[in-house]
Image (tube, rainbow, N blue to C red):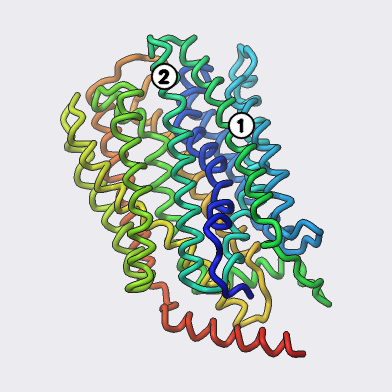
Amino acid sequence: MNQTKLKLPVKMGYGLAETGITAVQLFTQIYLLKYYTEIVGLNSSLAGIALSISVLWDAVSDPLMGRISDHTHSKWGRRRPYILLGGILLSLAVLLLFSPPHLTTQIGKFSYLLSVYLFVNTAMTIISVPHIALGGELSFERNERTSVFGWRLFFSNIGMLVGMIVPAAILQSLGDESSKENIILSRTTAGEIVSLVILVSSIITFLVTKGKDRTKEKPERTIPFFKAFLSVLKNKMFLILLFAFIIATIGRTFNSAIALYYYEYRLGLKESLVVINILLPFFLVLLLSIGFWVWIAKKIGKKIPAFLGVFGLGVLTVIVYPLFPYGELRPPLIAAFVGGICAGSILIMDSILTDVVDYDEFKTGEKREGLYFGIWKMGVKFSQAFGIAITGFLLDIIGFQNGVSTQSQEVGFRLAMIFGPGVGFFFILGSLLFLFFPLSDDKHIQVQRILLKRNQKRTKV
């Protein structure tokens, strides 16, 4: 067990792969649905179905990928080979996603989106599950883990900026933002840039973490996958944390998928104006808040800061977004600053999950980081699939007209209710459920002491 402090280049090098992973995630979450409905011409409900099926496959494959990496034995380690392979495949998949051929039928457009997005999500599973599991293994010291996941979130936010800003900046530079040709060019060019980012960042992480990903000795007896899977789901402590995070993630998915619709058709703000003057400040503030959340978690523990951050974000979302006046930039900008501070608390959740894995090892004697993080990712993907599918159907239900430059005031109001109370409800509910999480900081410290003694005995033997 690694109890020493990690060097800064190792923590930064580990976190760097998250730049590409998150750039792909945000690029697709913000722009993909709108691109295929308004530019490619795919029906909103069909687009929602295609995206949700792909994400559901991603969710199902996550625990399997975690299990595979847990039992991988190679000279490169358990996790690192998949970080490199997944980065290469994801780089290729993104290029295909925003460069569809000319298709004339709804079934053709649906089939292309479904098949390519399945490829994207398969590649995402291959890289992201081993990567997050590796973060929980780099150090056994609880504050170092928080720091590791702090750097992961730091680079995640860099990736958010890339996935969010690059497409809008390219479109703005082309002049007419309503031109279909300019939108297509901006998305394909942005896809090439994001593809390069994921490729380079995954290679660097693979190289920098050399020697930090130790292959475990092969166990005498391997528990069957489904039996191991079910045993994890019997961990009530894990389930509380998982469901709290899943519920909050549904809110995040609603927020990402409907954001551009809300700002354009409710507030009358252009895409580039929103991305650069609202979303960019939000993520910059989130980025700067990471150090604060790492510091406060060290000072007073992890549970209360995590709760307050998510709960505060939910209350803010419920209250302010239905009230913003048409055409004004300052009110949503102020909300972006406050929301960015609250959203930074999300890093604590991943760090708490590593504590749960320690508790599982204390109870079972097995190290199953990959399986736990795989199921964690699976739960998140199910919530994303649900959020994406519901978003597509909600757009139809509220009377949104695809390909129309203006929408009715009633549609704008309904978008505000989804983007405000609809999103905020899930943040608040998730944070309240998290209050029932039973593993205290003191109890986790005791668990770690016992694990250290066990490991020392094994070393002596």
Within 10 Å of disc 1 (Cα), the crowding (few <14, some 14-19, many 20+) is some
Tally of numbered discs: 2
On screen, residue 452 versus residue 29, left or right, reads: right
Kind of residue at disc 1:
Leu
Residue occupying the point 61% across, 70% down: 232
Q: Which residue is mark 1?
A: 196
Residue 451 in the image: above or below residue 347? below
Query: Which quadrant holds the N terminus?
Result: bottom right
Q: Is residue 157 visible?
A: yes
On screen, residue 279 versus residue 101, left or right, reads: left
Residue 93 in the image: above or below residue 102? below
x, y percent for residue 375: 60, 59
x, y percent for residue 234: 58, 73
Within 10 Å of disc 2 (Cα), the crowding (few <14, some 14-19, many 20+) is some
Q: Nearer the viewer, residue 287 or 89?
A: 287
Q: Which mark is residue 402?
A: 2
Residue occupying the point 63% across, 21% down: 107
Kind of residue at disc 2:
Asn
Query: Which quadrant holds the C terminus?
Result: bottom right
Q: Nearer the viewer, residue 268 or 144?
A: 144
x, y percent for residue 288: 34, 49
Sequence order check: which comes first, mark 2 or mark 1?
1
Residue occupying the point 68% across, 76% down: 366
Residue occupying the point 61% across, 11% down: 104
x, y percent for residue 183: 47, 16
- Of tags 2 and 1, the one toward the viewer is 1
State the SS at label 1.
helix
State the SS at label 2.
loop
